Image (cartoon, grey):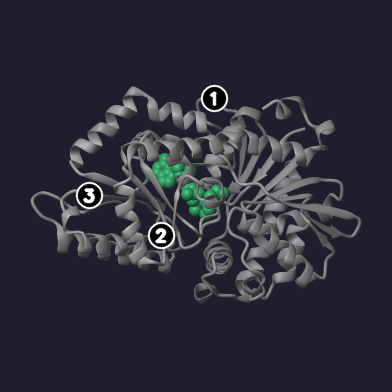
Amino acid sequence: MAVIVLSNREPYAPRTGPDGRVHWTASIGGLTTALDPVMQREGGTWIAWAETHPELRTVHLPEARPRYRVERLPLAEDDVRLFYHGFANGALWPMSHYFLERAQYRREEWDAYRRVNETFAQAALDCAQDGDVFWVHDYQLALVPGLIRRARPEARIGFFWHIPWPAQDVFRTLPWDRELLEGLLGADLIGMHTAAYTRHFLEACARTLGAETDVGTVRVGARTVRVEARPIGIDVATFETLASSPVTAERAQRLRDNLRTLMLLCVDRLDYTKGIPERLAAFGTFLERHPAARGRVTLVQVAVPSRERAPAYRHLRTQVEGLVGRINGQFSRDGWTPVHYIYRGLDREELVAHYRAADAMLVTPLRDGLNLVAKEFAASSQDGVLLLSRFAGAVDELPGAIEVNPYDVDGLSATLMRALRMPLEEKKARLAQMRQALRRHDLRAWTADFLRDLAGVAALPGPLVQL
Ligand code: GDG
């Protein structure tokens, strides 16, 4: 009995090095951060899209100490365009994040979405042994639970929806709302990040399907599907250890020495949901209102490249880089540059050194399923302040953060001043409060609880319940 994980993005991506050999690099993003550790511990199979190197179909990862198998599925060029850029990122992603003006619903893209979901479901069925547990991830694969259920009525299937589930009036703009819900309800257990998302989902089942629902459950024929808020945790101990190591302390000190000012940190995939232009505008306002801050505060924006082939994302990049240029053009002086803009991912150690060096971390998405960066900062910082958007799912769990409204440019600018003036004891108390909450629900507990509840304790293989 083993776990079969399905996700669109693969946990490690192959790159051909200068030596002509293929090297596997961990993908940056919430899903890999969350699931790779458990797969490395427990083994199993991970099924994902082979975005490059389609000739590599079955690989064992990580390279040095193979612990699990990845079944890589190549997709036809048309399916990449219609399924991935089309229905997944051009319809479901904006709709779920309340960006209806960006959502495009096209029949041809929906057809490709169904087709690719069938491919994933078939791949899982082909490699499954009796008793295996299927764990399907995210909005790209919503139909997979229903497809597996049809072929294997007895299967144990879990689903985790990583992004917001929007209010019913937004969800019902989707022409294939019934089909999407029916697909998801093939699962036994559906996890989401917040109680609000699960309420919206249950309302959708009741109103769109006329299904019988109760607190946290939906009746589907003879089956009862559980729908629960189970926000992903992080590996708190690893972040704490890494952040407090002498090497990180030295790196963090070097970052501070180079800046010679207070440091505001922002780390996001370059995505329009993350509120990057709004945040830069707030920083511009802050510098205008507080001349004394000029030369004393620097904003470091790490923007991880994302979905670069999509016009909306290319446009966002141009917009962000224009804003960075405008602020730097207006305020730079005497060797001080107000915004340091990094358009690439950092390696994990560098990232944690940035968390440690920052005086304040600005996590201000316009809408975000959860936001792991906020949690990672709270686990790594020793004297920083977290400003966190009220529209990030993580805000429910991090009472020590200062809650901000990312649409309120003036308010954000004022809160920045408050954060930078906060006494050290208050900063430490807030961090301690957040760390305590994070420790109670860390990543191991998240994975172990989900798999345990999915499989039923009696049927579980030993190691999974002992995590
Ligand atoms: C989706 C949902 C939900 C970021 N920059 C670097 C880097 N990262 C890592 C972070 C973090 C992950 O990527 C980003 O996770 P987020 O949660 O912030 O955002 P999404 O990618 O949009 O994730 C989100 C998540 O799924 C999980 O369910 O929270 O709401 O949108 O772990 O550390 N890692 C490295 N260098 C970087 O520069 N190494």
Alpha carbons under labels 1 and 3: distance apart: 44 Å
The crowding category of the residue bearing disc 3, from other C-alpha atoms within 10 Å (few below 14, some 14 to 19, many at least 20), is many
Lateral position of residue 222 relative to residue 206, left or right: right
Which residue is painted at 18% across and 41% down in the image?
260
Looking at the rendered image, the disc whose residue lies closer to the viewer, 2 or 3, is: 3
Q: Do the residues labelled 1 and 3 touch (CB within 8 Å)?
A: no
- What residue would you read off at disc 3? 297
Q: Furthest-top residue in view?
A: 246
Alpha carbons under labels 2 and 3: distance apart: 31 Å
The answer to which of marks 2 and 3 sits earlier in the sequence is: 3
- What residue would you read off at disc 2? 308
Alpha carbons under labels 2 and 1: distance apart: 32 Å
Secondary structure under badge 1? loop
Residue 20 lies, with reference to residue 114, above or below; the image says: above
Amino acid at pointer 3? Val
The crowding category of the residue bearing disc 2, from other C-alpha atoms within 10 Å (few below 14, some 14 to 19, many at least 20), is some
Which residue is painted at 46% across and 63% down in the image?
366
Q: Are marks 2 and 3 in contact (CB under 8 Å)?
A: no
Lateral position of residue 442 relative to residue 242, left or right: right
**Is ligand 1 within 8 Å of the beta carbon of the residue shown at mark 2?**
no
Horizontal and vertical percent position of residue 226:
78, 51
Horizontal and vertical percent position of residue 436:
54, 35
Amino acid at pointer 1? Arg
Residue 22 at least partly seen: no
Horizontal and vertical percent position of residue 203:
73, 66
Horizontal and vertical percent position of residue 82:
56, 67
- What residue would you read off at disc 1? 65
The crowding category of the residue bearing disc 1, from other C-alpha atoms within 10 Å (few below 14, some 14 to 19, many at least 20), is few
